[in-house]
Amino acid sequence: MRIAVLSDIHGNLPALNAVLEALAPFDAVWQLGDVVGYGPQPDEVVARLRDLASTGVRGNHDAAAVGELETSGFNSDARTAVLWTGMHIGAATRTWLAALPETSTSDGFALAHGSLRDPIWEYVMTTAAALANFAVLTAEHAFIGHTHVPLVFREDDGLVETLAPSDGSTLELDGRRTLLNPGSVGQPRDGDPHASAALLDTTARTVAWRRVPYDVATTQSRMRAVGLPTRLVERLERGQ
Ligand code: ZN
């Protein structure tokens, strides 16, 4: 089975559409949270995922947009965007977001937004954080997001190796456990503005990363039109 693994779409419909086109054909979509927040089209993004029968988890932005997480942990621009999202999503989007669990397991893979020990808030960027999460990982592999940076942590005999996948990188899943981050579809932060996503092949036991160009200017003009913060508009073209 070929599974499109998407994280941090953040209401960016042109980025989502470009990624879906680039990863096709696939049999399923897994999403790792922050479906909404920052971007101008939360309803359209949720509708697309609902049509694709995606499975997945909630992120901090999703929980805050439906009023199930305090916004005190957000920086000022993120809070502005999440409050805008909460005020502008329709009832069907709200219901769909509110039903997302904090963690789940799909085909033996653990799914979480931030991390396994703190699914909503923890950023797994260091080997220390990775080790702490391997300690609570009951599955062989986990997909996580939240950092907006494509990254792999692989455990080998108690040591953790870090890999930074780029466009076209393919990882073979062998006996070693991994934490796999596909990067962000809707707001990449590793200096490359192209949308980031991964394709899991459960038969070949491989994960392939892709960077996909999309119409950044269209997303930016929609953000300006609805009055989202300028800093959030501008960072999309820098991928930061
Ligand atoms: Zn995010």
Image: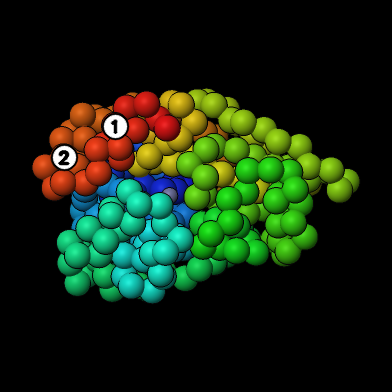
Residue 60 lies in quadrant: bottom left
Above or below, 47 relative to 90 = above
Residue displayed at 29% across by 32% down = 234
Residue 218 placement, left or right of 96: left
The residue pinned by badge 1 equals 234
Residue farthest right in this picture: 157
The residue pinned by badge 2 equals 224
Above or below, 63 relative to 82 = below
Residue 151 visible somewhere in the drawing: yes
Q: Residue 214: horizontal and vertical position, in percent?
A: 29, 30
For the C terminus, the image quarter is: top left
**Classed neighbour count for the residue bearing mark 1: other residues with Cα under 10 Å, few (<14), some (14–19), many (≥20):** some
Q: Residue 235: horizontal and vertical position, in percent?
A: 34, 33
**Classed neighbour count for the residue bearing mark 2: other residues with Cα under 10 Å, few (<14), some (14–19), many (≥20):** some
In the image, which disc is placed on residue 132? none
Residue 52 visible somewhere in the drawing: no
Residue displayed at 41% across by 70% down = 69
Residue nearest the viewer, comparing 51 with 194: 194
Q: Element at badge 2?
A: helix
Residue nearest the viewer, comparing 76 with 155: 76
Cβ of disc 2 within 8 Å of ligand 1? no
Residue nearest the viewer, comparing 165 with 235: 235
Q: Residue 25: horizontal and vertical position, in percent?
A: 38, 40
Instruction: Name the kind of residue labelled 1 in the image.
Output: Glu
Q: Sequence order check: which comes first, mark 2 or mark 1?
A: 2
Q: Element at badge 1?
A: helix
